[in-house]
Image (cartoon, rainbow, N blue to C red):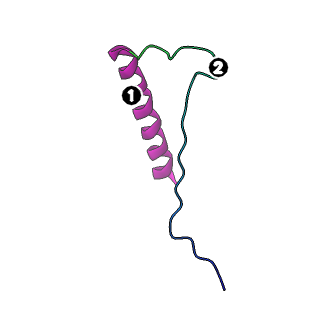
Amino acid sequence: MPVIVDEVVISIEVSNQAAGGAAPAPAGPRDQQTVINECVERVLDILAQKAER
């Protein structure tokens, strides 16, 4: 008789305590904007590559 899995739940906990370091300071608005711009640029590149196909 086959076994059917309806749902798989995966959970993790990320902690920096094992490394012995403190959590980094939150990124400032300028850093966040830089990350957002880079993400947008990458997404547009991927979309352009798919359009060329």
Which mark, by number, is residue 15?
none
**Category of crowding for the residue at label 1, using alpha-carbon neighbours closer than 10 angstroms: few (below 14), some (14–19), many (at least 20):** few
Q: Splitting the image into 4 quarters, where does residue 21 fall? A: top right
> In the displayed structure, would residue 43 be above or below residue 20?
below
The answer to whether 22 appears left or right of 34 in the picture is right
Percent x, y for residue 44?
42, 39
Percent x, y for residue 25?
44, 13
Residue drawn at point x = 65 percent, y = 82 percent: 2
Residue type indicated by callout 1? Ile
Name the quadrant of the N terminus: bottom right
Residue type indicated by callout 2? Ala
The answer to whether 44 appears left or right of 11 in the picture is left
> In the displayed structure, would residue 13 be above or below residue 38?
below
Closer to the camera: disc 1 or disc 2? 2
Percent x, y for residue 4?
58, 76
Question: Majority secondary structure of the magenta segment?
Answer: helix
Residue drawn at point x = 52 percent, y = 56 percent: 9
Percent x, y for residue 14?
55, 32
Q: Splitting the image into 4 quarters, where does residue 34 fall? A: top left
Give the residue number, with chain letter if any, for mark 2: 19
> In the displayed structure, would residue 31 be above or below residue 36?
above
36 is within the stretch colored magenta: yes
Query: Bounds of the magenta span?
Result: 28-53
Q: Helix or strand or loop: what does disc 2 sit on? A: loop
Residue drawn at point x = 54 percent, y = 60 percent: 8
Give the residue number, with chain letter if any, for mark 1: 36
Q: Are marks 1 and 2 in contact (CB under 8 Å)?
A: no
Q: Residue furthest left?
A: 29
**Category of crowding for the residue at label 2, using alpha-carbon neighbours closer than 10 angstroms: few (below 14), some (14–19), many (at least 20):** few
